[in-house]
Amino acid sequence: MWVLLIYVVLMIAGDLIDVGIGAVASNMWGDPVSLRIFLACYFATLALAWVAAVQIVERLKLTS
């Protein structure tokens, strides 16, 4: 249970950062490029947030 809660928190934080990166890219290079940058950041966040959540739970020894 804890891993899912931590994962959701990390994903929300990561998504906010991804939107910011996408907005900056949109202003610099336009919408088609910013969409690709945003999607790359989003899918990287999916994977990295899960790995980080598992490591946090293991390090803190949280149980259900």
Image (tube, rainbow, N blue to C red):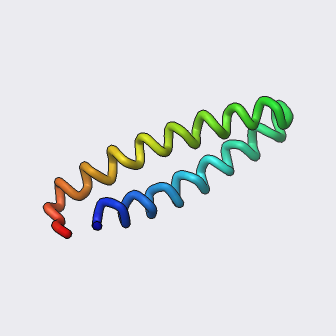
Residue at figure coordinates x 18%, y 65% from the top left: 62
Quarter-of-image position of residue 5: bottom left
34 shown above or below 16? above
Tell me if 16 is positioned left or right of 30 in this view: left
Residue nearest the observer in this picture, 62 or 13: 62
In this figure, what is the number of numbered marks? 0
**As drawn, is 28 to the left or to the right of 12?**
right
Q: Position of residue 26 (x, y in %)?
A: 80, 39
Give the quarter of the figure containing the C terminus. Answer: bottom left
Q: Residue 56's x, y, as percent?
A: 26, 55
Q: Nearer the viewer, residue 64 or 30?
A: 64
Q: Quadrant of residue 41?
A: top right
In the rendered image, residue 52, in percent from the top left (x then y), is placed at 33, 48
Residue at coordinates 58% horizontally, 53% vertically from top-left?
15
Horizontal and vertical percent position of residue 44: 50, 37
Give the vertical position of 12 relative to 20 (above or below): below
- State which quadrant residue 61 falls in: bottom left
Q: Residue at x 16, y 67 (%)?
A: 63
Image quadrant where one finds the N terminus: bottom left
Q: Is residue 51 left or right of residue 19?
A: left
Position of residue 61 in the picture relative to residue 16 (left or right): left
